[in-house]
Image: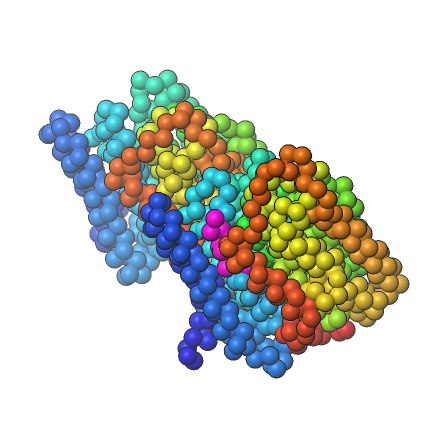
C-alpha cells in the first residue's frame, strides 16, 4: 500500500467528517444504525492511526516530518495544504483517535438529555476532524482553521446537552477561545509580514523569523501566548474551564479534558517556540511563573470544591500547570515530560470524567457531601476510581508520574538564558503542588468511595459497571498502567522531535 | 474623444458601440420590457409566467458576462467612460446572481400576500440593470446615472407593502435620506468637475496628481462624494435609515438592499477612490479610518441589543460594511500600491453576499410558520426543523467568521491587508476589528442559542413547509458559504482578477 502513505493523514482527518455527513442522512429513528456508523468511523480512523504507528520511522531525525502531503490550497495568500507528523504530533494524534472511539462506545447507553444521538454523534465526529487536523497541520492558516473547527461542535455539545447552567457556560467557552484565536491569527499574520516569509508553512516561518526585531518578536509571542494560554488554560485565563467542564455532558468533558486542552500546549511546542525561540527565552520566566501559580491555585481551588466534576476541572488547571512548567524550561527533558504529561493527563483525566459521568448517572448528583460509600454500592467502579486517583496524583508506576516528576526535575536546570534561580524556586513550589494534589485527590476519594452511603442512597440499588463502561474504560486503564511501567514507549517516540524543537532555542 | 466636448466643438460623431460588451445590459433591457408588456397583456393573470421570465432573463444576461470573461479583453467605450474589464465582470456576475436569488425569495412571498407582481419584477430588474451599469462606469456622469437607476426602483420596492405602516416608514426614510445623500454627492462631483474640468475618472486621476491638486476645494469634493456613498453602504454615522428600512421593507427586498445595493455602493467607491482619487490618499484614508472604526463598533454594539432578527441582521450588515471598509483605511500605505486593497474588498463582498442572502432566505422560511420576526420566535427550531436550524447556524456563524464557514476568509484577507500596511494606525485598526469580531459572535451565537437550546415558545412544532424557490436559494447560499470556507481559492481568484484589471 504505497499510495496509502500519501493519503493516510488526510484520511485520518476527513474520515470522521465523512462519517458525520453519512449520519445526517440516516433517519432520526434508526438509532442503531447511527451508533454503528459512528463506531465504525472512529474505529476505521483508529485503524489509520495504527497504520501510522506501524509505518512511522522512529529512527528518523527529528527535523523531518513524515507522511507529508503538500498541495495548493489558497494561492492568493501563499497558504498551502501541508500536513505531516513527527514524534510530537503522532502520540497526540493517536490519543485523539483513541479517545473518540471510547467516547462513542461509552455513548452506547449514555445519551444525555435531550437524547438525539444523531446530532450528538455527528458533533463528536466533527470534533475529531478538527482535533486530528490541528495535530497534523503544518501551515499556520490550515492550523488556524482546524483549531477553530472544534469550537462550534463543542459549543453545541455544551449548550444543548449540558447541565442547568449550560447556556452561560457554552457562550463563555466560545467567547474566551475566540478572543484568544483573534489575537493568535493577528500574530500569525504579523509573523508572515514582519519576517517576509514566502508562505505560511511553519518551516518557512521558522527560518524567516530571525529577521524580526526583538521587540516585535516579544509582542508577537505575546499574541500567540494569549491564544494558546486561553486554550490550555493557564492561570489567569482559566475561568471558562470549570464552567465548561461542569456543564458539559460526560462525553464533552472527556474530549475537552483529554484533547482540546492539548491543542493549546501543542501550539506552544509546535508553533510558538520553534518559530520564535528568542522570544520564548524572554517569556519563559513569565510562563513558568504562571504555570506554578496555576499548580498551586488549581490545587487550592480543588480543596474548595463541593462538586466532583468541578473538582476534576480544577485539577486539570493544576496538571496543565505541570505541563506548562515543563515547556517553559525549554529543555528537551522538560518538553519530553510535557508531551508525556499531555498524554497522561488525557488518559487519566479523561477517565476521571468518565467516572464522574457514570456516578452522576447513578446518584443523580455530584455533590461531594451527598456521595459516599461507592465501594459498598458499586465496588468495581469504586476501585477504578481509586486507581485513577492514584494515577492522577502521580504515583510511580502509573502514567501520571512520568508527566509530573520529570517536569519538576527539569525546572532544576532550565535552558541557557533562562534564570536558574527562578526556575529552582518554581521547582520547589511545584513540588509543594504535588503534595497538595495528593491531598485533594485522596480527600475526594475518601468522600466519594469510603464510608457508608448517605441516607438517601442507602436503600437505593446502584448498578455496578455495565458493558459499555467496560468497553470504554478498560483500554484506558491498561494504557495508564503500561505507560507507567514502561514510559520509554512514549519517550522513545517524542525524543528526536523534541530535540529538534529545543535545538532552535540552542539548549 | 471626450463625450462632453463633442457637441461643443461642433463635430458630433456617434460613438462606436461594442455590442458584445453591452450584451448583458441589452439582454436585461429586453427582458425588462418583456416583463412589463407580458404583465400588461395578461392583466396580472400570468403571475408565474412573469416571475419565471424575469428569473430566466437574469440567467440569460449571465451568458454574455461569461463569454466576455472567456474573451478576457478589456473593452473601453465612449472615451473611457464605460469599461468592461474583469473587475466589472466579477461584479456583474455578483449582481445577476444576487438578483436571481432575490427573485427566488420573492416569488412565494408575493403570492402569499397578494401584492402586485409584474411591476415588482420590472423594478427589481431595473435596479439590477443600474448595478450592472455601475460596475462599468468610469465616469462621474455615468456613475450618477447608474446610481439613480439602481436607487429609484429600490425606493419603491422598499415600500411595496403599502398597507403596512412600517413599510411606509421604510420607504420614506430610505427615499428622503437617499435623495439627500445623492445631493451631497452631486455637489462633490460638481466641485471636482469644476477644478479638473474632467468627468472621466482616469483623467481626473491624472489631474489630481498634478499641480493644484491639493486645493481645499478638491478635498471638499472628495469628502462629499465619499459621504454620498457612505449613505449607500450604510456606514456609521450615515446608517440611520438602514434598520428601519430593512425592517419595514419586504424581506426579499431587504436581502437585496443589504447585499446587492451595498455592493453597488462599494463598486462605485472602489472605482472613484482607486482611479479618480488615487493620488489623494491623504484625504480619503483618514476619513475611511474613522468611518470603518465607527461602522464596525457602532454596528456591533447596537446589534447586541436587538430582539428582532431583521433589525439584528440590519445592524450586523452595518458592521460587516465596516470590515469591508478596512482596506480603504490603509490602502495608501500598501507596499504593492493602493490597488492591492481591492482584492480583499472584492473577496469579502462576494463571501458576504452568499452568507447574508442565505440568512435572509432563512428568515423568510421561518417566518412562513412563525409569522414573527422576533429572535425569541426561533426558540426550539431544532426540534421541529433541524435542517433549517443547521442552515441558519451555518449562515450566522459564517457571518461571525468562524472557520470553516465562508466568512473567516473574508476577515482573514482584510486583517492581512491591515498588517501588510504595517503602520501604527493600521495595527490599531486591526485590534479594533479583532475585538469587534469577538463582540459580534455574541449576538450571532444568541440566534443559535435560541434555535438549539431554548424551548419552543408556543409549543407549536408543526414542521415548516419550505417552497421550492426558497429551498433552491437556501441550498445555493449554503453550498457557496461552505465551499468558500473550505476552499477559499474559488473566491480569492475573483478578488485577484478584479485588482489586476482596474489598476492603471
Residue located 26% across and 40% down the image: B469
| Nearer the observer, B303 or B241 | B303
| Nearer the observer, B91 or B372 | B372
Residue A278 locus on image (x, y percent): 74, 66
- Tell whether position A489 is magenta: no
In the picture, the quarter occupied by the C terminus of chain A is bottom right
Residue farthest toward the right in the current orientation of the protein: A421
Residue located 36% across and 45% down the image: A28
Q: Quadrant of residue A138?
A: bottom right
Q: Is residue A421 left or right of residue A84?
A: right
In the displayed structure, would residue B169 be above or below residue A319?
A: above
Q: Is residue B53 left or right of residue B259?
A: left
Residue farthest toward the front in the current orientation of the protein: A459
**Residue B308 visible, this angle:** yes
Residue located 32% across and 34% down the image: B463
Instruction: Please report the bounds of the magenta region as a residue range.
Output: A99-109
| Nearer the observer, B231 or B468 | B468
In the displayed structure, would residue A196 be above or below residue B408?
A: below
- Tell whether position A100 is magenta: yes
In the displayed structure, would residue B276 be above or below residue B230?
A: below
Residue B31 locus on image (x, y percent): 19, 40
Residue B343 locus on image (x, y percent): 46, 54
In the picture, the quarter occupied by the N terminus of chain A is bottom left
Amino acid at each position: 500500500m504505497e499510495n496509502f502513505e500519501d493519503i493516510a493523514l488526510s484520511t485520518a482527518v476527513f474520515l470522521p467528517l465523512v462519517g458525520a455527513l453519512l449520519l445526517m442522512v440516516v433517519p432520526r429513528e434508526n438509532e442503531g444504525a447511527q451508533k454503528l456508523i459512528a463506531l465504525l468511523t472512529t474505529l476505521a480512523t483508529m485503524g489509520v492511526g495504527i497504520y501510522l504507528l506501524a509505518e512511522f520511522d522512529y529512527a528518523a531525525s527529528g527535523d523531518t516530518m513524515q507522511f507529508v502531503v503538500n498541495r495548493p490550497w489558497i494561492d492568493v495568500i501563499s497558504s498551502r495544504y501541508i500536513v505531516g507528523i513527527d514524534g510530537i504530533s503522532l502520540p497526540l494524534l493517536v490519543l485523539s483517535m483513541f479517545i473518540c472511539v471510547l467516547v462513542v462506545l461509552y455513548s452506547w447507553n449514555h445519551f444525555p438529555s435531550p437524547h438525539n444521538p444523531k446530532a450528538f454523534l455527528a458533533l463528536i465526529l466533527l470534533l475529531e476532524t478538527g482535533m486530528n487536523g490541528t495535530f497534523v497541520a503544518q501551515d499556520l492558516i490550515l492550523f488556524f482553521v482546524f483549531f477553530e473547527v472544534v469550537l462550534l461542535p463543542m459549543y453545541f455539545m455544551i449548550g444543548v446537552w449540558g447541565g442547568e447552567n449550560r447556556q452561560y457556560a457554552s457562550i463563555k467557552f466560545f467567547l474566551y477561545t475566540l478572543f484568544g484565536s483573534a489575537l493568535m491569527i493577528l500574530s500569525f499574520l504579523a509573523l508572515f509580514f514582519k519576517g517576509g516569509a514566502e508562505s505560511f508553512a511553519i518551516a518557512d516561518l521558522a527560518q524567516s523569523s530571525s529577521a524580526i526585531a526583538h521587540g516585535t518578536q516579544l509582542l508577537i509571542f505575546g499574541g500567540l501566548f494569549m491564544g494558546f494560554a486561553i486554550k490550555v488554560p493557564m492561570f489567569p485565563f482559566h475561568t471558562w474551564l470549570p464552567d465548561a467542564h461542569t456543564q458539559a455532558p460526560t462525553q464533552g468533558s472527556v474530549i475537552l479534558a483529554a484533547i482540546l486542552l492539548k491543542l493549546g500546549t501543542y501550539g506552544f511546542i509546535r508553533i510558538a517556540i520553534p518559530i520564535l525561540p528568542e522570544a520564548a527565552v524572554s517569556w519563559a520566566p513569565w510562563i513558568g511563573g504562571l504555570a506554578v501559580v496555576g499548580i498551586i491555585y488549581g490545587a487550592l481551588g480543588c480543596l474548595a470544591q463541593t462538586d466532583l466534576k468541578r473538582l476534576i476541572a480544577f485539577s486539570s488547571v493544576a496538571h496543565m500547570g505541570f505541563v506548562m512548567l515543563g515547556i517553559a524550561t525549554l529543555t528537551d527533558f522538560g518538553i519530553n515530560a510535557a508531551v508525556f504529561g499531555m498524554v497522561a493527563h488525557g488518559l487519566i483525566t479523561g477517565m476521571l470524567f468518565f467516572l464522574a459521568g457514570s456516578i452522576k448517572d447513578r446518584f443523580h448528583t455530584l455533590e461531594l457531601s451527598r456521595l459516599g460509600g461507592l465501594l459498598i454500592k458499586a465496588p468495581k467502579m469504586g476501585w477504578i476510581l481509586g486507581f485513577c486517583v492514584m494515577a492522577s496524583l502521580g504515583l510511580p508506576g502509573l502514567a501520571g508520574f512520568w508527566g509530573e516528576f520529570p517536569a519538576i526535575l527539569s525546572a532544576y536546570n532550565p535552558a541557557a538564558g533562562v534564570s536558574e534561580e527562578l526556575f529552582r524556586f518554581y521547582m520547589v513550589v511545584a513540588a509543594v503542588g504535588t503534595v497538595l494534589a495528593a491531598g485533594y485527590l485522596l480527600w475526594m476519594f475518601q468522600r466519594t468511595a469510603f464510608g457508608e452511603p448517605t441516607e438517601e442512597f442507602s436503600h437505593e440499588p446502584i448498578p455496578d459497571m455495565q458493558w459499555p463502561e467496560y468497553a470504554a474504560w478498560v483500554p484506558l486503564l491498561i494504557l495508564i498502567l503500561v505507560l507507567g511501567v514502561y514510559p520509554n514507549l512514549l519517550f522513545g517516540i517524542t525524543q528526536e522531535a523534541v530535540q529538534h524543537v529545543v535545538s532552535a532555542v540552542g539548549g | 474623444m471626450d463625450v462632453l466636448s463633442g457637441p461643443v466643438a461642433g463635430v458630433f460623431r456617434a460613438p462606436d458601440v461594442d455590442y458584445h460588451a453591452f450584451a448583458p445590459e441589452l439582454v436585461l433591457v429586453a427582458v425588462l420590457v418583456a416583463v412589463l408588456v407580458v404583465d400588461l397583456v395578461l392583466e396580472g393573470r400570468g403571475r408565474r409566467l412573469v416571475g419565471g421570465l424575469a428569473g430566466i432573463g437574469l440567467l440569460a444576461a449571465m451568458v454574455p458576462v461569461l463569454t466576455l470573461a472567456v474573451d478576457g479583453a478589456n473593452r473601453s467605450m465612449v472615451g473611457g467612460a464605460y469599461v468592461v474589464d474583469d473587475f466589472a465582470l466579477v461584479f456583474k456576475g455578483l449582481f445577476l446572481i444576487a438578483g436571481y436569488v432575490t427573485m427566488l425569495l420573492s416569488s412565494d412571498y408575493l403570492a402569499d400576500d397578494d401584492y402586485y407582481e409584474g411591476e415588482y419584477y420590472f423594478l427589481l430588474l431595473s435596479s439590477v440593470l443600474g448595478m450592472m451599469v455601475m460596475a462599468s462606469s468610469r465616469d462621474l456622469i455615468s456613475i450618477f446615472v447608474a446610481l439613480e437607476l439602481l436607487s429609484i426602483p429600490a425606493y419603491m420596492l422598499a415600500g411595496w407593502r403599502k398597507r403596512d405602516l412600517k413599510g411606509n416608514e421604510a420607504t420614506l426614510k430610505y427615499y428622503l435620506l437617499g435623495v439627500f445623500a445623492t445631493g451631497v454627492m452631486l455637489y462633490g462631483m460638481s466641485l471636482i468637475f469644476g477644478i479638473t474640468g474632467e468627468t472621466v475618472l482616469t483623467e481626473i486621476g491624472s489631474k489630481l496628481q498634478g499641480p493644484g491638486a491639493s486645493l481645499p476645494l478638491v478635498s471638499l469634493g472628495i469628502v462629499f462624494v465619499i459621504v454620498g456613498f457612505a449613505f449607500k453602504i450604510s456606514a456609521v454615522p450615515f446608517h440611520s435609515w438602514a434598520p428601519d428600512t430593512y425592517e419595514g421593507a419586504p424581506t426579499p427586498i431587504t436581502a437585496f438592499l443589504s447585499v446587492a445595493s451595498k455592493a453597488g455602493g462599494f463598486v462605485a467607491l472602489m472605482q472613484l477612490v482607486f482611479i479618480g482619487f488615487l493620488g489623494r490618499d491623504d484625504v480619503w484614508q483618514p476619513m475611511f479610518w474613522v468611518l470603518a472604526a465607527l461602522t464596525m463598533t457602532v454596528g456591533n454594539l447596537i446589534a447586541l441589543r436587538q430582539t428582532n432578527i431583521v433589525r439584528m441582521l440590519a445592524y450586523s450588515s452595518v458592521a460587516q460594511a465596516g470590515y469591508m471598509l478596512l482596506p480603504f483605511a490603509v490602502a495608501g500605505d500598501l507596499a504593492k500600491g493602493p490597488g492591492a486593497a481591492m482584492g480583499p474588498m472584492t473577496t469579502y463582498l462576494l463571501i458576504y453576499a452568499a452568507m447574508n442572502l442565505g440568512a435572509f432566505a432563512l428568515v423568510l422560511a421561518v417566518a412562513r410558520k412563525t409569522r414573527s420576526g422576533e429572535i425569541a420566535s426561533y426558540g426550539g427550531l431544532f426540534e421541529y426543523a433541524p435542517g433549517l436550524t443547521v442552515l441558519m447556524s451555518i449562515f450566522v456563524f459564517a457571518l461571525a467568521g468562524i472557520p470553516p464557514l465562508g466568512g473567516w476568509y473574508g476577515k482573514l484577507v482584510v486583517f492581512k491587508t491591515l498588517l501588510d500596511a504595517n503602520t501604527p494606525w493600521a495595527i490599531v485598526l486591526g485590534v479594533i476589528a479583532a475585538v469587534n469580531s469577538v463582540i459580534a459572535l455574541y449576538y450571532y451565537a444568541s440566534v443559535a442559542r435560541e434555535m438549539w437550546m431554548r424551548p419552543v415558545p408556543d409549543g407549536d412544532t408543526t414542521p415548516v413547509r419550505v417552497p421550492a424557490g426558497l429551498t433552491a436559494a437556501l441550498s445555493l447560499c449554503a453550498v457557496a458559504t461552505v465551499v468558500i470556507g473550505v476552499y477559499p481559492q474559488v473566491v480569492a481568484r475573483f478578488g485577484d482578477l478584479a485588482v489586476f484589471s482596474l489598476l492603471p
